[in-house]
Amino acid sequence: MQMAGNKHTIHRFDDELNEIANLVDKMGVISVNQLRRAVKSLKKENPVSAHKVINRDRKLNALEVETDDKIIQLIAKRAPVAGDLRQIITLGKVVTDLERTGDEARKIAGLCVRFYETDHHSPGDHILRDIFSMSKYVGNMLEIAMEAFSRLNVEQAFGVLRMDEELEVQFEAILRRLSTFIMEDSRNIGHFVDIVLGIRALERFGGHAKNIAGHVIFLSTAKDVRHMEADDVQQLLGLTAPGESAWCDRG
């Protein structure tokens, strides 16, 4: 990623800033892969693969530490102000959200270990299917948010805000559906809390993708859209409604 803004007379500042941004891009790729591998381990009932996902989270944590250290060094050496400081601080916030998406992916892998590393009754596919579909959706959210970050694309970032609205609708519908499964078959009671915690982890994963999209908007426009409804953000930025392709399912 190349950060926006005017080139500096001290070209090393631009190089260091872009080095940090590239580390952030790398974290985004790892985070999406972690979620997909965690869900795959759950689908395949493979706790060995799930443990690998859990252990791999250390790589994301290490990148967070490395990136934070580079941010601190850059601030100390260059004493940035105004727009430069805004960029650096916002990069740090993106890093924090990415590290937390890794934590949520690890929780999904933990479900696989809990369900299939013991001889306890495992949940049926009809209970797990919402985790599979929701994980695909929030994985797409993060991919689009990171594309928006790489391109500093406000329209793509706004699309993620719209996706988050749909995510909240999905989340409530899934909770209602799970309650129905409990009433239909009491054997599902033992898994209810675990499944709800998994769904909550995915909802939070999507929430961090939304946060990253908001950071992209702040980087690009200097407008803080945290805690704002998507309609208000659209009006504030003067955006036309993005096409469905901006946040569609990528298959």
Image: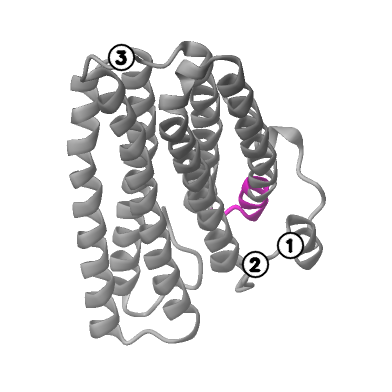
Of label 1 and label 3, which has the lower sequence position? 3
Q: Is residue 132 magenta?
A: no
Above or below, comparing residue 249 to residue 102 in the picture? above
Distance between the alpha carbons at the discs numbered 3 and 2? 41 Å
Report how far apart the C-alphas of labels 1 and 2 lie in the structure.
6 Å
Q: Is residue 220 left or right of residue 18?
A: right
Asked which quadrant contains residue 238, the reply is bottom right
Q: Which mark is residue 225?
A: 2
Q: Nearer the viewer, mark 3 or mark 2?
A: 3
User: Do residues under tags 1 and 2 come within 8 Å of each other at their CB atoms?
Assistant: yes
Q: Going from the N terminus, do you reach mark 3 or mark 2 first?
A: 3
**Which circle marks residue 45 in the picture?**
3
Within-10-Å neighbours for mark 3: few <14, some 14–19, many 20+: some
Q: Amino acid at mark 3?
A: Glu
List the residue tagged with mark 1. 233
Identity of the residue drawn at 42% across and 80% down: 85
* Residue for point 22% across, 76% down: 73
The picture places residue 212, in percent across and down from the top left corner, at 50, 55
**N-term-proximal mark, 1 vs 2:** 2
Is residue 156 located in the magenta-colored stretch of the structure? yes
- Image: 138 above or below 164: above
Residue at 77% x, 58% y: name it: 234
**Secondary structure under badge 1?**
helix
Local crowd at mark 1 within 10 Å, few (<14), some, or many (≥20)? many
Comparing 57 with 131, the one in front is 131
The reply to whether the C-beta atoms of the residues labelled 1 and 3 are less than 8 Å apart is no
Amino acid type, mark 2: Val
* Magenta part of the chain: 152-160
User: Nearer the viewer's eye, disc 1 or disc 3?
Assistant: 3
Which residue is farthest front? 186
